[in-house]
Each structure stands twice: as structure tokens, then as C-alpha cells.
């Protein structure tokens, strides 16, 4: 028979672990770059975009000083996607670290 007190204790521990993961992810910062560093996206472990840095040369472009908006848009997307991948890695690492290497389906 399952002890209801143990279930309550386990739920409490699970909530504490979830809060710890969320706290760590909020403090984790990753960067993704594209265009050889022309665009940098900074994101936290919760996948919230914190900052976009665009080097002035990326705005001017290489085609006679005219802004190449399409290229810049592609660079921003690529940098954000790279930062997102790094955030996913941080999420997986944090969850695995807190769970102590347990092999749970869907977590690695």
C-alpha cells in the first residue's frame, strides 16, 4: 500500500527540484553568433532573448555601402537559432544534473 505521507513528501521534493532548475536556467546565459561574429544573440536558459548585438559592418553590407536587409535578417535568425540550441543544451544539462543522472524517458 502507498503511504500518502510519502507521496506528499515526494511531491514537495519534486517542486523544490523544479524551482531549482528554473532558478538555474534563469541565471544561465548563452550566446549564438552568425556571420563570423557580425550578429550575436544572447539568451538565458529559459530561452528568453536578452540581447541582439549587430556589428555596424553587417548593416552596411558588402554591396557598395547599401544596407543588405535580407542578409541581416538571415544573420539574426541564425544567431537566435544557435543561442536556442545552446539554451536547450543548458536545459538538458541542468535537468540531468539535478536528477543525478537518472535515465528518464524523454530527458536524454
Image (cartoon, helix red, strand yellow):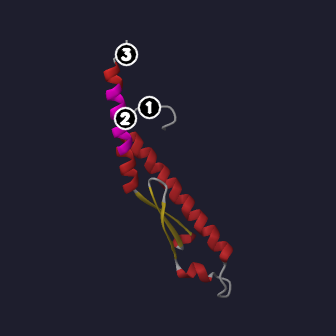
Mark 2, mark 1: which one is toward the viewer?
2
Residue at 63%, 70% in the rendered image? 73
Return the residue at label 3: 2
The kind of secondary structure the magenta stretch mainly shows is helix
Inter-mark Cα distance, 2 to 3? 17 Å
Tell me, for residue 103, which label it has, or none: 1
Residue at the spot 39% in from the left edge and 54% down from the top edge? 26
- Magenta region, residue range: 8-19
What residue would you read off at disc 2? 14
Question: Does dot 2 land on a helix, a strand or a loop?
Answer: helix
Between 65 and 4, the residue placed more toward the observer is 4
Where residue 38 appears, as percent x and y from the top left, is 54, 74
Which badge, 2 or 3, comes first in the chain's sequence? 3
Residue 67: quadrant of the picture: bottom right
Q: Residues within 10 Å of mark 2 (few under 14, many from 20)?
A: few
CA–CA distance in space, label 2 to label 1: 16 Å
Direction from residue 65 to residue 88 in the image, left or right: left
Amino acid at each position: 500500500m502507498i503511504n500518502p505521507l510519502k507521496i506528499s513528501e515526494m511531491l514537495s521534493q519534486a517542486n523544490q527540484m523544479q524551482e531549482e532548475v528554473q532558478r538555474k536556467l534563469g541565471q544561465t546565459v548563452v550566446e549564438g553568433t552568425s556571420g563570423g561574429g557580425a550578429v550575436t544573440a544572447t539568451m538565458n536558459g529559459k530561452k528568453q532573448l536578452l540581447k541582439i548585438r549587430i556589428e555596424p559592418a553587417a548593416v552596411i553590407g558588402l554591396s557598395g555601402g547599401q544596407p543588405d536587409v535580407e542578409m541581416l535578417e538571415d544573420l539574426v535568425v541564425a544567431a537566435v537559432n544557435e543561442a536556442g540550441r545552446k539554451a536547450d543544451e543548458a536545459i538538458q544539462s541542468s535537468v540531468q544534473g539535478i536528477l543525478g543522472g537518472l535515465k528518464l524517458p524523454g530527458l536524454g
